[in-house]
Image (spheres, helix red, strand yellow):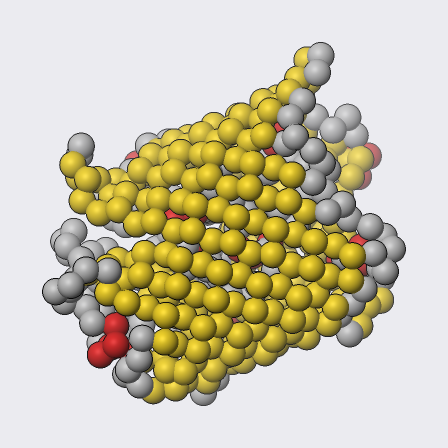
Amino acid sequence: MFSGLGDRPSASGYRRPIFLLLIFQAVPAGAVAQSSIGAQVMGIVTRASPAIANRNLTEGYLTQPMLMGSVSTADGHFALEGMLDLEGLTLERGELDAGISGEGYVDRRHPHTYLHELVATATGAFAATRYSAALGKGFVPFGTDDPMVRPFEKYPINHHISQIVERLLATVAVRNGPFLIEGALFNGDEPESPSDLPNSNRLWDSWSARTTLLPTSYLEMQGSVARVKSPELAAGGGLDQRKVSISARAESAASMDSRDAHYYVLAEWARSSDYDGRDRAFSFNAALAEGELSRGRVALAGRFERTERPEEERLANPFRTKRPATDFNILGRTLWNITSARASVRTFQRGTMTFTPFVEVEASHVTARATGSVFNPRAFYGSNTLWSTTVGVSFAVGMIHRRAGQYGAASRESGEMSMAGM
C-alpha cells in the first residue's frame, strides 16, 4: 500500500520553509561572491519481506525532499548555509527500514524537521591557521557524514549512534595543515516532531569535540566524543548519553570528465552509552563499512553494518514506541547484521538537472543479544532474516551539498558540487 501525506502540518510548519527562502533572497547581491541553491527528491517503492508478524509490506513514498542553499560574502569571511527537509509532509507514517529506530519510530525511518539546517559562519586566518565560529541549527561535529549525503537511500541503523543532527549549536573550528579540531555546545533534546524547535531551557547543555587528520586530499581520519544530556526526554531528567566515534574515509578527486572512475570508501566504529548520573545503564556498539565505485553514468555500491539496538515496548502501532518513555527499562537488545547492495544509472542529464533510477537490496539478520530477553525477534518478525528491495528514481537540480556539517575552517574543497560533475 502507498503512504499518504499524513496529518496536515501546522501553519508554523509552512512558515519556516518560506522564511528560510526569504533569507537567501534578501541578501544584497553586491555583497555576495558565491551563492548556490539546489533541490532533490526521491520517489521509491520498498518491499519488506517479512516486515512484521510474518507479513510482507509494499509501500511507496516521496522521500528526502530537500531544498538547500548557501551564500557567502565577497571577502569569504561570512557564510550562511541552509537546508529544508519536507519529509514532514511525505513521511508522517515513517519509511520502511528494517532495524532502524529513533524519535519514537522503530523499523521505520522518522521524518526529519523542516528546518534541517540554518547556520551562519564567520571565518578568519592567521598565518597558516584557519579558524571559524558558527551559530545556528544543524549538524554537530561528531562522527561521520549524515546518511543523506552518502550513496544509499536507506539509512543505516546506526544513525542515532554515529551522528548528532538538528541541534541548535555554537561551534568553533581550527585548522592548520592536515590537523583540524572542532568543538561545539548544543541542546541535547531530540526533536519531537517535524515542526519542533529546541527547548529554550535546554540550550548549550551538551557538548562534542572532533579531531580530524587530513594527510592527503583524498583521505581523512577522525575521532570524536560527545556528552548528550537527556536526548530522549525533552523536558530533561532522562538518561544521558556518552558517545564516541572513529572513522576513516577516502574519496577520489571529482572530475568534470564523466569517463573517469570515481570511488568512495568509509569505515567507522561508534558506541553510545546511556548513563544515570555516573552509573552506566546500557551501551550499544555499531560498526559499518561502505563504498561506491562509479564510471560514466553507472554506479555500484555496497555496505555492511553490525549494530546493537535497544528493544522498547511497542504501541498498538507496532512501528512506534512511546515518546517520551515512562521509564528507563528496555525489553532487551538485538544484534543486526545487514548487507546491502545498490546499483544506479544516471539516465538523463541536462545542465545541473539529473534523473537517476536505482535499486537497493538489503538482507538483515537479527538475533537477541542475550538469552532470556523478553523480545524474541523470530517470534516478532516471523524470521531472523529480513529482506528489503527498494526501486526508485532520484531527481536533483542545482548545487547539492555533498558533505554535512563542515562549517568554516572545517569545510573541504570538495564539500559542495554540482550534480553535473558527478
Q: Position of residue 222 (x, y in %)?
A: 52, 35
Closer to the camera, 168 or 179?
179
Closer to the camera, 365 or 284?
365
Instruction: Examine the rendering and report whether any part of residue 107 can be seen.
Output: no
- Image quarter of the C terminus: bottom right
Question: On the rendered structure, is 45 left or right of 394?
Answer: left
Question: On the rendered structure, is 132 left or right of 368?
Answer: right
Residue that appears at 31% across and 61% down: 335
Q: Position of residue 91 (x, y in %)?
A: 46, 70
| Rendered view: 317 above or below 115 | below
Residue that appears at 70% across and 26% down: 77
Find the residue positioned furthest to the top: 127
Closer to the camera, 340 or 189?
340
Closer to the camera, 308 or 400?
308
Instruction: Examine the rendering and report whether any part of residue 216 can be seen.
Output: yes
- Image quarter of the N terminus: bottom left
Q: Position of residue 20 (x, y in %)?
A: 60, 49
